[in-house]
Amino acid sequence: MATKEQIEDIKFKLSIAMEYKKLYKQLDLDLTTLAVAVGISCWSLSDLIKSAYGIGFREYLNDIRIRKVLEEIARFGDSLEVNDYARLVGFRSRVTFFNAFKSRLGKSVSQYISENTSLDNY
């Protein structure tokens, strides 16, 4: 069992891998690749994500990608196609993107964009 300091260190490395190295943009990002980037075994990383965030790796990854796509929508508004937003943040599957978005925000991507795009974006 890792100490609290070790867990915080791994969470910090995980944050760097996802936020600064932007590994979430990799279409083929998997647990093993992320574990190598963080410097721990995939089992340890899986356990850490589950215990620290209460979700599995895929849900963790999709949460980050949805958070990032919201930032991109705020930046670009309706100037990009929905599929472009999906690829921009690393979703390979359009269906996965749509499902992840709707499950977190309760509305479709198109609906969210139309409701949150103002004339200020032009």
Image (spheres, rainbow, N blue to C red):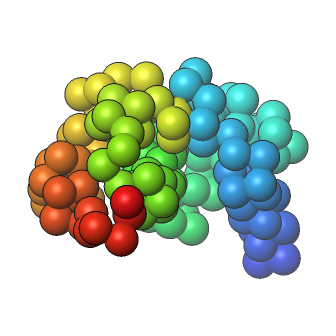
- Looking at the rendered image, the quarter that the N terminus falls into is bottom right
The residue sitting at 41% across, 31% down in the picture is 84
**Residue 11 seen by the camera:** yes
Query: Would residue 117 be found to the left or right of residue 3 on screen?
Result: left
* Residue 67 at x, y percent in the picture: 45, 59
* Residue 113 at x, y percent in the picture: 24, 55
- Looking at the rendered image, the quarter that the C terminus falls into is bottom left
Query: Would residue 52 be found to the left or right of residue 33 on screen?
Result: left
Query: Would residue 50 be found to the left or right of residue 74 on screen?
Result: right
Q: Depth check: 78 or 73 in front? A: 78
Q: In the figure, 78 relative to 48: above or below? A: above
Q: Depth check: 30 or 76 in front? A: 76
**Residue 55 seen by the camera:** no
* Residue 92 at x, y percent in the picture: 43, 23
Q: In the figure, 95 relative to 89: above or below? A: above
The residue sitting at 44% across, 53% down in the picture is 76
* Residue 73 at x, y percent in the picture: 39, 55
The residue sitting at 22% across, 48% down in the picture is 109
Q: In the current view of this chain or complex, which residue is farthest to the bottom?
A: 4
The residue sitting at 60% across, 36% down in the picture is 25
Choose top left, top right, bottom left or bottom right for residue 14: bottom right
State the count of labels: 0
